[in-house]
Image: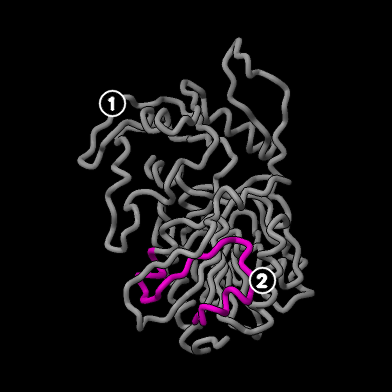
């Protein structure tokens, strides 16, 4: 219903066609990408462009009305050359996906010269060069604030925003950053971001994550970062038949026994049984299908969640995850190189 500007600009959706189940999309238009928040980040977007390969809607609203509206959704898609299709019964399509699982798809025009049988192998494709940065980028003005390295495997701006909000400086670094390059910044902690695709293809990031665990560096993994930390610790991951995508997914915090409502966007998960042979234990579980939604190390200051604590769009039930990470940093001190 709301949140399509944040969702379409979420790098975790790279390579996917997004189907909206709410009947009418685009009624409040698209705000300005030039409007920034107090941290200098785009206020209404999660990256600098649309990340999906296409979108499917039932009714596309060509009349948009909102105080922040600068263009229609259709104009935004046109400007960024992203195809879309409307007048589709998206709820019926969703029923098919719910029965058969996630599937490949394409949007083609009748009679188009591009109509062919070429297949795109999403599972083996490495999206990292498309969604990560090429060189370190710095955020935050307080030189005395502790520094956190954010390994960018497709990060959302809201992760950076929340790290700045709780008092960190942030150094955003490429997905294949080595442990030596991280330690050169003398960080107080490290965050592994969200991102698209199968975590198995991020071999360099998994190697770096193994070093973070071994050296007891305070670390937070989010979404793809959760899976990467699990693989680094010896667990296994698998593709979910039904990916978790939406703003109202219920998860149980096994530490507090509280249920929280989370925003999620992932098609892969951690195999629960594989955690038994590792030093990780389950922290959160999904109430609907009982899959792993978070892990924590039994000895090291390493935690990770499968959902998006920064939400955007979504509820702010789980912002406390960032505070948990901050507590780990305080407890375990500044890391020396």
Give the CA separation, mark 2 to mark 1. 48 Å
Task: Name the residue located 65 percent from the left edge and 18 percent from the top edge.
Answer: 115
Q: Is residue 246 above or below residue 317?
A: above
* Residue with the most extreme right position: 277
Q: Nearer the viewer, residue 90 or 82?
A: 82
Q: Position of residue 263 (x, y in %)?
A: 48, 55
Q: Which mark is residue 208?
A: 2
How is this picture coloured? one colour
Residue 318 in which image quadrant: bottom left
Classed neighbour count for the residue bearing mark 2: other residues with Cα under 10 Å, few (<14), some (14–19), many (≥20): many
Give the extent of the magenta segment.
161-188
Look at the image and tell me in which quarter the N terminus lies: top left
Task: Name the residue located 52 percent from the left edge and 31 percent from the top edge.
Answer: 91
Considering the numbered disc 2 on the image, is that residue within a helix, a strand or a loop? Answer: helix
- Residue position for label 1: 63
Task: Name the residue located 40 percent from the left edge and 75 percent from the top edge.
Answer: 168
Task: Name the residue located 44 percent from the left edge and 50 percent from the top edge.
Answer: 47
């Amino acid at each position: 219903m709301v949140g399509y500007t944040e969702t379409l600009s979420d790098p975790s959706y790279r390579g996917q066609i997004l189907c909206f189940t709410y009947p009418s999309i685009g009624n409040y238009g698209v705000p300005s990408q030039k409007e920034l928040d107090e941290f200098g980040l785009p206020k209404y977007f999660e990256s600098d462009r649309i990340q999906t390969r296409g979108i499917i809607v039932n009714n596309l609203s060509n009349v948009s009305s909102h105080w922040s509206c600068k263009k229609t959704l259709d104009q935004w898609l046109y400007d960024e050359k992203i195809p879309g299709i409307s007048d589709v019964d998206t709820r019926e399509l969703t029923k098919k996906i719910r029965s058969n699982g996630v599937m490949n798809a394409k949007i083609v025009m009748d009679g188009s010269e591009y109509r062919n049988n070429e297949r795109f192998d999403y599972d083996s494709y490495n999206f990292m060069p498309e969604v990560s940065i090429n060189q370190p980028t710095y955020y935050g003005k307080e030189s005395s604030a502790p520094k956190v390295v954010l390994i960018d495997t497709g990060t959302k701006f809201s992760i950076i925003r929340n790290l700045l909000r709780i008092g960190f400086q942030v150094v955003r670094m490429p997905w294949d950053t080595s442990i030596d390059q991280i330690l050169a910044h003398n960080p107080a902690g490290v965050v592994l971001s969200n991102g698209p695709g199968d975590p198995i293809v991020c071999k360099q990031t998994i190697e770096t994550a193994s070093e973070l665990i071994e050296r007891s560096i305070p670390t937070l993994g989010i979404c793809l970062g959760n899976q990467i930390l699990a693989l680094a610790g010896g667990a296994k991951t698998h593709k979910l038949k039904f990916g978790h995508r939406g703003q109202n997914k219920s998860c149980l915090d096994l530490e507090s026994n509280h249920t929280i409502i989370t925003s999620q966007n992932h098609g892969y998960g951690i195999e629960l049984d594989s955690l038994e042979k590792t030093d990780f234990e389950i922290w959160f579980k999904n109430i609907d299908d009982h899959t792993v939604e978070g892990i924590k190390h039994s000895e090291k200051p390493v935690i990770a969640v499968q959902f998006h604590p920064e939400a955007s769009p979504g509820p702010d039930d789980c912002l406390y995850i960032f505070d948990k990470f901050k507590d780990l940093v305080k407890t375990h001190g500044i890391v020396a190189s």
